Image (cartoon, rainbow, N blue to C red):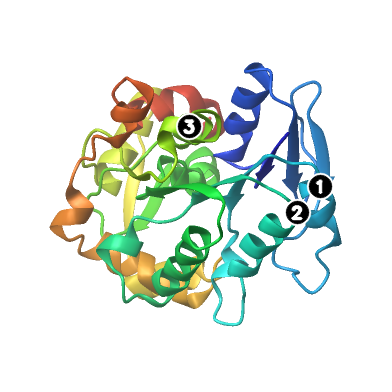
């Protein structure tokens, strides 16, 4: 049995579906229940509440593998996400695939990156088999614009003409499935990006083309963007993210070959992601 945390999110949902279609028994863990493939067990658990880990312990009982996605509140200074690694080992889990961050390598001194590095190190020292996925920015971050596109025909974002090679969460899920199921990926560290650098202004143009309707781009200041981000993520994670998207360094602009290395095809473009998700913007 394989446990998928964050199972109702942009990565966990397609990963859960892929594992179920591969004939695996899957336990989907999330705070809230959502529609799941037939035969998938769901358990509600809050990974951030390690003082009361009964839900996660129940999910891990009898599991052979774990996909670990850390929610935003596990990036705060007082969080102890590495404890989840110890819990998985004590429950007899044999393999963990960790969704980490590109910034662990490209911005190792950022506060949220230091914490994620500690989780990676705990996993390496755990005695379990492991693989680490380090994606850059997600194409699905554009869902944050859906309401404003629908109601006002507007995309608002900072640093409108600064781009990074955003990755499709479906590609992350496909790589994660391969790492969970195939022994050849044990000990692998995979940097996951899309196939091209694309700016927020260009993303707005892609959405407009898919809708066949004008979409106006409004550039936010860093302060405005930070105020919006910290409604959902810790301030440390917001600052680290804004540092990257305001001035990506050469490593953060590099197109990684790792998606193709693992799944045997080129990564999906932002255009591909929009084509699959255009209904959200109508």
Q: Residue at (48%, 23%) from the top-left corner?
A: 276
- Where residue 265 sits, quadrant-wise, is top left
Q: Residue at (41%, 31%) from the top-left corner?
A: 184
Kindly identify which numbered label has been placed on residue 84: none
Q: Is residue 144 visible?
A: yes
Q: Earlier in the sequence, mark 1 or mark 2?
A: 1
Q: Dot 1 corresponds to which residue?
A: 61
Disc count in the image? 3
Task: Work out which quarter of the rendered image holds the N terminus and state it.
Answer: top right
Cβ–Cβ below 8 Å for labels 1 and 2?
yes
Q: Dot 3 corresponds to which residue?
A: 183
How far is mark 3 from mark 2, CA to CA?
A: 21 Å
Q: Position of residue 143 (x, y in %)?
A: 50, 43
Q: Is residue 145 above or below residue 237?
A: above
| Nearest-to-viewer mark from 3 and 1 | 3
Q: Residue at (48%, 29%) from the top-left corner?
A: 178
Q: Residue at (62%, 76%) from the top-left corner?
A: 79
Apparent side of residue 272 relative to residue 228 in the rendered image (left or right): left
Q: Position of residue 241 (x, y in %)?
A: 37, 65
Label 2 sits on a secondary structure element that is loop
Apparent side of residue 63 relative to residue 43 in the rendered image (left or right): left
Q: Please tell me which residue lies in front, 9 or 129.
A: 129
Q: Is residue 59 above or below residue 159?
A: above
């Amino acid at each position: 049995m394989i446990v998928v945390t964050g199972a109702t999110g942009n990565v966990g949902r397609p990963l859960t579906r892929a594992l179920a279609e591969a004939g695996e028994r899957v336990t989907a863990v999330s705070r809230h229940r959502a529609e799941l493939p037939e035969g998938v067990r769901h358990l509600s658990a809050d990974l951030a509440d390690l003082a009361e880990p009964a839900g996660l312990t129940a999910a891990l009982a009898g599991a052979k593998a774990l996909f670990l996605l850390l929610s935003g509140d596990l990036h705060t200074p007082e969080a102890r996400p590495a404890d989840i690694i110890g819990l998985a080992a004590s429950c007899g889990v044999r393999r963990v695939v960790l969704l980490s961050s590109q910034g662990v390598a490209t911005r190792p001194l950022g506060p949220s990156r230091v914490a994620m590095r500690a989780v990676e190190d705990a996993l390496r020292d755990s005695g379990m088999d492991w693989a680490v996925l380090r994606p850059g920015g997600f194409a699905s971050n554009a869902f944050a614009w859906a309401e404003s596109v629908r109601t006002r025909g507007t995309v608002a974002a900072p640093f409108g003409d600064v781009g990074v090679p955003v990755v499709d969460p479906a590609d992350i899920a496909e790589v994660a499935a391969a790492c969970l199921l195939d022994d050849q990926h044990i000990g692998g560290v995979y940097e996951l990006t899309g196939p091209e650098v694309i700016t927020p202004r260009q993303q707005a143009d892609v959405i407009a083309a898919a809708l066949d309707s004008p979409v106006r781009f409004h550039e936010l200041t860093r302060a405005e963007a930070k105020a919006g981000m910290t409604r959902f993520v810790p301030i440390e994670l917001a600052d680290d993210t804004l540092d990257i998207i305001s001035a990506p360094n050469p490593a953060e602009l590099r197109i990684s070959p790792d998606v193709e290395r693992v799944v045997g095809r080129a990564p999906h473009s932002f255009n591909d992601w929009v084509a699959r998700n255009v209904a959200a913007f109508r």
